Image (cartoon, grey):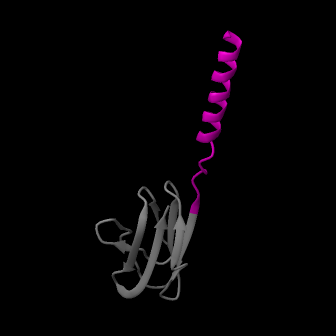
Amino acid sequence: MRRTISMIALSIAVMFLGACSSKPAPQTHTILIDGFKFQPALLTVNVGDNVVFTNQDMVPHNAVDEGKFNSGKLEQGKSWTYLAKDKGTFDYICTYHPNMKGHIVVQ
């Protein structure tokens, strides 16, 4: 009886550890700002992932989702990292060039 209980407890522990380790490790994704566009314009990531915005244009840009995130002014060659903490769809623009739009979906 004791052995059976020990085996059941061990099986439960192994299943629990397996379930805990199935979460993917955080990833880093890149959005290039080039040619007055966010590339890619749509990016899907997981909670905990990092999204690096890098400005390759000769003029400053930013990435702003009002009330959620703001990269600040990104000069040519500069980068900013957004940590995806909350699930949802985040629609952002460059406030210097409002026709520049992008979307991040956090799962």
Q: Residue at x 50, y 61 (%)?
A: 107
User: For this rendering, which residue is in front, 50 or 71?
Assistant: 50
Q: Residue at x 48, y 68 (%)?
A: 105
* Extent of the magenta region: 1-28
- Left or right of 29? Residue 74 is left
| Residue 63 appears in view | no
User: For this rendering, which residue is in front, 77 or 23?
Assistant: 23
Taking 12 as reference, is 1 above or below it? above
| Residue 71 appears in view | yes
Spot occupied by residue 96 in the image (x, y as percentages of width and height): 34, 84
Spot occupied by residue 2 in the image (x, y as percentages of width and height): 67, 10
- Count of numbered tags: 0
Q: Residue at x 43, y 55 (%)?
A: 85
Taking 18 as reference, is 43 above or below it? below
On whether residue 13 falls in the magenta region, the answer is yes
On whether residue 15 falls in the magenta region, the answer is yes
Spot occupied by residue 42 in the image (x, y as percentages of width and height): 51, 77
